[in-house]
Amino acid sequence: MNEFQALILGILQGLTEFLPVSSSGHLEIGHALLGDTSTNNLLFAVVVHVATVLSTIVVFRKDILELLKDLFQFKWNASTIYISKLVFSALPVLVLGLFFKDEIEQLFVGNLVLVGSMLLFTALLLGLTHFVKKTDGEITFLKAFLIGIAQAIAVIPGISRSGATIATGLLLQTKKNEIARFSFLMVLIPIIGAAFLDIISGEVTSDTTIGLMPLTVGFIAAFVSGLLACSWMIKIVKRGKLIYFAIYCLVIGLIAIFAA
């Protein structure tokens, strides 16, 4: 992978991590279109996902600081309940990461038929939200767990993490602004945890097929584009305009399948 490829893929990751069109699926398509022959696409995916986590922290910095301030009061208050729901939502993806990591890594091999098929599934999920007329419910522990299952399923390239979690929340009659906030905050725990485990295990530095400079370029590109996309997506969810992304995923999914 060279710097130009890393720049394009980083921008692609930053934009598609928050827009409900599957960042992992677009990365796999991007690798194929750019002719990238790196043997460890998962390493690059981890780096740019960490970059978008940092952009999430920047966008939601006030919310996060408020939650942490209340957390360290060591009382069972609204913030500790909310954080508990975030942790609860991370359990399904934690199980996948601990027991099925090797199987997940085998999915990131540029299988465009798989990516295209899962983009069609994402389109279906997003399309279903178009028929939800009113969403005014709160996020309960049960809803948090079900949304967490949606996040776990979204490890498959082509299924949008934000699309799956937001769509699930809306289908469960959750307030639009609440599910957008919860969807973006819930990803912090699994990605930070996975990155930490990879670092201490040495997996991140064990492969040398991707140089430091492309990784750096990809990281910066994903961070900057992620800042823009995160803020934009919050507004989109509030306006309920997900149907357009359903159409986009449908078209891109079909192109990926026929181009395979």
Image (tube, rainbow, N blue to C red):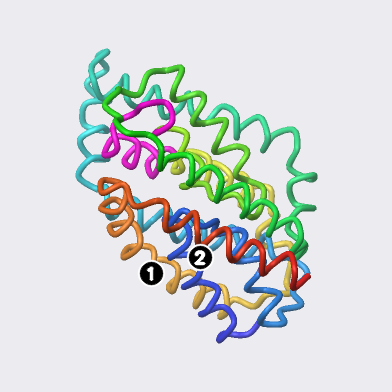
Q: Which residue is mark 1?
A: 225
Depth order, front residue of 63/165: 165
**Callout 1 secondary element:** helix
- Residue 97 position by quadrant: top right
- Magenta span: predominant SS is helix
Q: Are marks 1 and 2 in contact (CB under 8 Å)?
A: yes
Residue 229 as seen in the image, left or right of residue 203: left
Spatial distance from mark 1 to mark 2, Cα to Cα?
A: 8 Å
Up the image or down, 60 lies above or below 224; here it is above
Up the image or down, 247 lies above or below 83; here it is below
Say which quadrant the C terminus sits in.
bottom right
The amino acid type of the residue labelled 2 equals Gln
Residue 174 as seen in the image, left or right of residue 122: left
Q: Position of residue 185 (x, y in %)?
A: 37, 41
Residue occupying the point 35% across, 36% down: 179
Residue occupying the point 56% across, 78% down: 6
Say which quadrant the N terminus sits in.
bottom right
Numbered range of the magenta stretch = 170-186
Q: Position of residue 159 (x, y in %)?
A: 60, 49
Q: Position of residue 138 (x, y in %)?
A: 30, 22
Q: Residues within 10 Å of mark 2 (few under 14, many from 20)?
A: many
Q: Which residue is mark 2?
A: 13
Residue occupying the point 45% across, 27% down: 87
Does 81 appear in magenta?
no
**Callout 2 secondary element:** helix
Up the image or down, 38 lies above or below 196; here it is below
